[in-house]
Amino acid sequence: MKTKPNPIDRSSFEPAYLQLVRVLREQIAAGQFRPGDRLPSESQLCRRYQVSPMTVRRAINLLLEQGVVTTERGRGTFVKPLELGGVSFSLDRFQDLLTDRDGARIQLLDVRIVEADERVAAELDLPVGDRVIHMQRLFHKNGEPLIYHAHHLIYDPKRPVVEAEMEVTSLYGLLSGSGTSLVKWGRLGVHAAVLDASQARLLRRSEGAPAFYLEHTFYDYEDRPVSWGGFTCPGDCFHFTATVGVVEGCEPSRAAPGRI
Amino acid sequence: MKTKPNPIDRSSFEPAYLQLVRVLREQIAAGQFRPGDRLPSESQLCRRYQVSPMTVRRAINLLLEQGVVTTERGRGTFVKPLELGGVSFSLDRFQDLLTDRDGARIQLLDVRIVEADERVAAELDLPVGDRVIHMQRLFHKNGEPLIYHAHHLIYDPKRPVVEAEMEVTSLYGLLSGSGTSLVKWGRLGVHAAVLDASQARLLRRSEGAPAFYLEHTFYDYEDRPVSWGGFTCPGDCFHFTATVGVVEGCEPSRAAPGRI
DNA sequence: CCTCATATGTTATATAGGGAAGTTTTGTCA
DNA sequence: TGACAAAACTTCCCTATATAACATATGAGG
């Protein structure tokens, strides 16, 4: 058996456990270990790379959380096969649009106090006819309209959502708000949709054009709904991408951004 | 200062570090720690819960990877504010359709060998005019057509993709295939789309109906493209959901399934 | 009052080791 | 040969400890 040089560089800034993760990933990516194969045992890895058991464990745990391998107690660590179910898409770039930077502009189309109809009342857990705030906005990027946003907010003097929400930046201040946020959590959904006539006019596109509808409901610390609405994102400007499997570049099955 | 009882149960099957994760999550979910707040230092947590530093570290690391907290070396660990960018949507249920279970049926519409046009040649990294396999399929669930799938495959006698791919189960066998898989990794994209005339007829829906188009390109161990195509999923049957923020039930910002 | 060195508190990384639980292999005994 | 027990191996979890790197507070000296 030939003795390979130890690829773990102790003088590097990169921690040993991360180096080990990288080395193992590279070996998997190179096909040295294929789906279903068993990796060397932890003690073997210790000897092979001259690191302590805890370091190996930590590396294995990372690979586990990254979805690259599975472990079976008493049997070994195995390379996971590809599966579409593990893929996930993230909204990375979306938040950039909600904030102000980089030529992003937020146009307030309309704000008014209306009475909740059945649908709104159900979503916000209010009696029908209660007063709620209805808000419509248009997000621009480089002068072009990009996203249409409409949502309903509770209007309760006892709950100071209004003041925080009336700012034009709105959602961003309410979500990632400096200091104490009012919102504890939210539920999101992505639907396939087409533009209706008014949306098409606002977004300067043709009616019936494909779009993503990103629905959102946010809840406060008493788990009461605070806001319900959605973003309409034309399909010609938005898409989600991701990779599955162990690719050479680091960070694999982790999701990738989503705007062209 | 009142001495609270130690919520870490050492006789439990649940590992200490997971219990600690749960406890901290509950405190955050309950509003005991709010976004921006600093969590107790690691040594404080050691004393408070009577566990060793490594156990605390592991718990903190988990919270870190779950996106619940951020850490700043030399300053402390802080509760993360809500941010949409961190949300991710997964394809959990999608794979169920690719396999056979639960009343799922796969109808082979057409398989033929064609010459690659410019687009196909570019995607599969082949010369224009090379022979490729074109395949169209229809996925049914409980008798209803659900997904339309069309893709092109390389047709190279030297690469035994064909035999593995000709099975009706196709993609599933090629991906999650038992034994040695041919595919090392893949690139996925989700686009907003509408049904064209032929798709509408096959899927028994109206033309122009909204849909998701899940594009895919798969690569072999030499990083050469093997397959390119996409799934057309009518919007009335598919959507993605996710939650953002720390919700009472475990596993939060982790993505959620996607079929109604 | 300002500046700079020091001390303290924090997270990050690493080593060494031990025990529990599960699986596989080996070996012994009938 | 067959059945069963023992050993070996593997993953898993935890403890104890040490060092490094970074941030902030403290205090002395000008």
Image (cartoon, coloured by chain):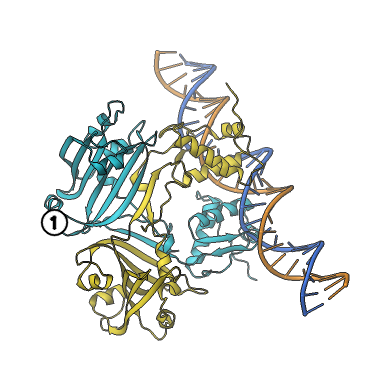
Chain colours: A yellow, B cyan, C blue, D orange
Q: Residue C12 at x, y = what percent?
A: 61, 52
Q: Position of residue A215 (x, y in %)?
A: 31, 66
Q: Which residue lies at the image location 47% right of the left edge and 70% below the top edge?
A: A176
Please name whichever residue, A233 or A130, is drawn nearer the observer in this view of the structure: A233
Q: Is residue B143 left or right of residue A2?
A: left
Q: Residue at x 40, y 67 (%)?
A: A97
Residue for point 59% across, 53% down = B57
Question: Is B186 rendered above or below residue A127?
Answer: above
Q: Nearer the viewer, residue A76 or A5?
A: A5
Q: Which image quarter holds the N terminus of chain A?
A: top right
Q: What amino acid type should be assigned to the residue bearing mark 1?
A: Arg
Percent x, y for residue C14? 65, 43
Report crowding for label 1: few under 14, some 14 to 19, many 20 or more residues within 10 A (C-alpha). some
Pick whichever, B193 or B43, lies toward us.
B193
Q: Is residue A77 visible?
A: no
Element marked by disc 1 = loop
Q: Is residue A127 visible?
A: yes
Which residue corresponds to mark 1? B205
Quarter of image, res A116: bottom left
- Looking at the picture, how far across and down is residue A47, in whole percent? 61, 31
